[in-house]
Amino acid sequence: MADSTDPQSQQPQLSEAQIAVHWREENTLPPPPPFIAQANAAEAEIIERFSEAHFPDCFTEYADLLTWDRRWDQVLDTSNPPFWKWFTGGRLNACFNCVDRHLATSGNKAAFIWVPEPEDQLTQVITYQELYRRVNEFAVLLEDFCGLKAGDRVTFHLPMVPELPVAMLACARLGVIHSEVFGGFSGTACGDRIADSGSRVLVTMDGYYRGGSLVDHKVKADEALLAAEKHGQEVDKVLVFRRRPGQYASASPMVEGRDFFVDELLPQYRGRTVKPVSMPAEAPLFLMYTSGTTGRPKGCQHSTGGYLAYVAGTAKYHLDIHPEDTYWCAADIGWITGHSYIVYGPLALGTTSVLYEGVPTYPDPGRCWRIAERLGVNIFHTAPTTIRMLRKLGPEEPRRYDYRFKLMTTVGEPIEPEVWRWYHDEVGKGEAVIVDTWWMTETGGFLGTTLPALQPMKPGSCGPGALGILPVIYDEDGNTVEAGSGKAGNICIRNPWPGVLQTVWGQPERFVDIYYAKYNRNRDSKDWHDWPFLCGDGAVQAADGYFRILGRIDDVINVAGHRLGTKELESAALTVPEVAEAAAVPAIDEVRGRAVEMYVALQPGLAASEEIRHSVAAAIEREIGKIARPAHIWIVPDMPKTRSGKIMRRVIAGISNFADVGDTSTLANPEIVDDIRHRVQSDKIAAGHVPRVLTPEETQEIQEFGKAE
Ligand code: WT7
């Protein structure tokens, strides 16, 4: 994947930050009294404890939720901005905090209840005691058989099975840095990440159930190794878990001396334990890759002490997790939500978590509610895309099941107020409090959300800053956009916080450029006030201080809560030899939030064909994964371009969304616009698409799309 050499392209911009955004201000709802009566954060005084006056010491309250081998000397070390160091001098082990320390009081309590997708397969309960054993045995295997030690990286390409948290915790026990690649990503995408992280070991699984069938997954490991090798990265060992031990579910052959079945190796390590390695607070715990303006994925590096403290604290106060709750986060562990709020946060607090293997609507839209009823789930965590899907397929389904949620979350994309209300009234049965949690891969944990017992809910707005987080909206020149002004701008966080990424793996300059360069006041300053963190979202702040997130400003398309970089999509399309130019744009989608539409222009003399369209789809699936498959691939005679040859993505985005394409007079080839519009829109209408009027925010997003370039 080519990296952009133009430093300008790394500077996301919302150039019309002063554009007024109008939307109907929603009424707030107070939290239900029974919720307040049991909440972890029930006294308003906590807000004062985490106010700016108490920064950074307030975060010791989070660190004190953990067990430290050695207490820190300094809460926040700002000596090398913006490479902040939290709890320096402190030592701890993340696995010990998530597993060992619960054994004495809760050894036989469920840590995870795993629900396989096929409904006739029994749930598996994994107690803290069993988790301890499984983690230890796998850790010894990583150490003895693979030779891994603290600081080494290992890549996982695992689906939603208990083996994934087991493997993560085994690494954490040894101080090995894990890098899990979402199971739905392609082998090639996995291989690029193996190479970037310098992993010599890949942990994968032969197959898993999804949407009713057993998917062959091991085949992707072979592709991944080829891709890694192209970047010069050798992988010595591929550890293959079997979804059904003893029964191989893949058509891909096992490579002698390289590929090993974990269920065949593990018996040698039965009962073996390894002492948790005491790690410095600042040691990296894991990498999580994400997309941005340029093609190459960024390996967000998260720390051991700061990160774990932050996810434990936010899970306790914002998700209101108590050890006796049964918590279900329906996200995939392959994304940051799963790392922070399925594995590390909930386990640090010693709660019981549900893990579900499959599709939320399989085999019918009642599945989630049956799981909740059967297992007594009382906290439910999911994304707007899932909520929209469940609402579409089974609007009255929740009523048929006997479960009670005390708290529900929405995360990953903006939620429409109507969808929010269905979630509240139907899924939450009017009894559950909702927290809309806004954050991102880079931030480790929540940035904007409410304290559920203390701050009212407002449909479509995430809330004020999370505890100890000081958000601000700046315009392009770094002036503060005042709350209640009705103006949008770039949302930033003024202060460092313990969950923030430490760096972009192997690319410290890029880390500074992407997140700090834009609003830094003085490169030499050691004062954190001079280093606001650029989140990469546009936002508006209402007079009451609540933020409403408008979406990414860096050419990222958020499909069903997954961040897809337009550059990655376009580079994938460009691997097809017939394709000369490619441009990916977002199309508003009623279920998935946004869908990708890919426009391609062919090499001179070639005619459009179904075959080429197919090759483009296949290339995207191969390079990124099925999740990135475009909703449409339009082959066009030419792209609308400026005189300097730049593709005007906002014009094609306007066409895809039946929106005004704006001023086209500066184009080198304005005549092409009508031609493309005619082809695309008549095709869509013929296929039954009914265009609707876009909201002002949607119009703004579409008309500004591609500006970051
Ligand atoms: C982007 C981050 C948050 C972890 C999962 C996604 C969007 C996230 C919200 C929300 C509106 C949201 C933002 C953000 N986003 N949460 N509650 N309301 N938008 O992590 O893949 O790094 O994506 O997701 O645009 O920048 P991610």
Image: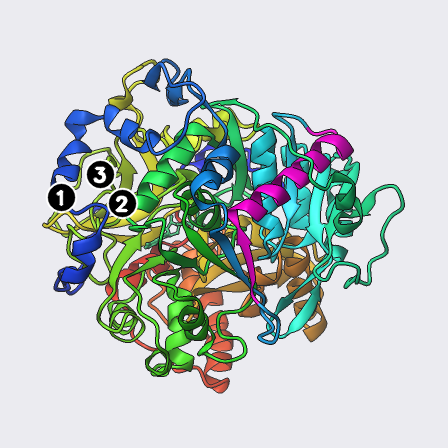
Report x, y in % for residue 490. 28, 42
Upstream in sequence: badge 1 or badge 3: 1
521 and 347: which one is in front?
347
Secondary structure under the numbered disc 3 in the rendered image: strand
Q: Which of marks 1 and 3 is in front?
A: 1
Label 1 sits on residue: 43
Label 2 sits on residue: 317
Q: Does residue 460 lie above or below 73 as drawn? A: below
Label 3 sits on residue: 472
Secondary structure under the numbered disc 2 in the rendered image: helix
24 and 157: which one is in front?
157
Q: Residue at x 86, y 56 (%)?
A: 253
701 and 201: which one is in front?
201
Task: Kindly identify the amino acid type of the residue bearing the numbered disc 3.
Answer: Val
Q: What stretch is highlighted in magenta?
A: 123-148
Report x, y in % for residue 690. 39, 82
CB-based contact (under 8 Å), mark 1 and mark 3: no
Task: Kindly identify the amino acid type of the residue bearing the numbered disc 2.
Answer: Tyr
Q: Residue at x 35, y 53 (%)?
A: 324
Task: Kindly identify the amino acid type of the residue bearing the numbered disc 1.
Answer: Glu
Q: Does residue 298 lie above or below 320 as drawn? A: above
Upstream in sequence: badge 2 or badge 3: 2
Does the image show residue 63?
yes
CA neighbours of label 1 inside 10 A, class few (<14), some (14 to 19), many (20+): few
